[in-house]
Amino acid sequence: MGRRRRSREVALKLLYALDITHEQAADILKAPWIEAVMSDTVRDFTVALVTGVAAHRETIDALVQEWSLNWSLERIGVIERNILRFAIYELLYLDDIPPNVTINEAVEVAKRYGTDEAPSFINGILDRIKQELVMRHGDGPTAMSSVSPGSPA
């Protein structure tokens, strides 16, 4: 398994902990148990994902709500919700990762940690987001940090 896949899996665990405990990202990242799940080889990307999601969570959650047709954020399982969060963070703010790679990686993490329906659910939402981003910003690699819910294409 590659370092970025491992980082995504560790980020999922940390985002899950944040969701359950309502602690701050900085506090979770300092917790003693972190050393058991996060090796030095995955630390940088994991921290980037966790702190990025935490910093942009309101925007990301609004986008999840907008693009997950007929699903409230609370109705989406904790695992699936946090996979969507880190994947949407990647799509919006990490322009060095191709969108298809982000989507494929999120689906693979969902296969391992989510319900049987999680991979197709996550793929469907992320694909809709990708298509919307392409309509708004073209097909080239560009940071989408200016994207906001309900903004016109």
Image: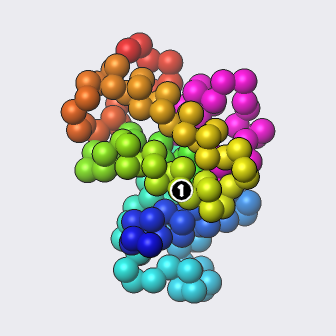
Relative placement, left or right, of 138 versus 110 is left
Main SS, magenta region, reads helix
Does residue 26 lie above or below 152 as drawn? below
- Element type at mark 1: helix
Residue 123 locus on image (x, y percent):
54, 39
Q: In which quarter of the image is the N terminus?
A: bottom left
The amino acid type of the residue labelled 1 equals Glu
> Crowding at label 1, few (<14), some or many (≥20) Cα neighbours within 10 Å?
some
Magenta stretch holds residue 8: no
- The residue lying at 63 percent from left, 30 percent from top is 68
The residue at which mark 1 appears reads as 108
- The residue lying at 33 percent from left, 35 percent from top is 144
Number of disc labels: 1
Span shown in magenta:
59-81
Residue 30, located in which quarter of the rendered image?
A: bottom right
Looking at the image, what colour scheme do you see? rainbow
- The residue lying at 38 percent from left, 43 percent from top is 100
Q: Please say whether residue 18 is visible from this viewpoint.
A: no
- Identify the residue at the far top of this view: 152
Residue 129 locus on image (x, y percent):
47, 30
Relative placement, left or right, of 84 versus 5 is right
Magenta stretch holds residue 80: yes
- The residue lying at 61 percent from left, 67 percent from top is 13
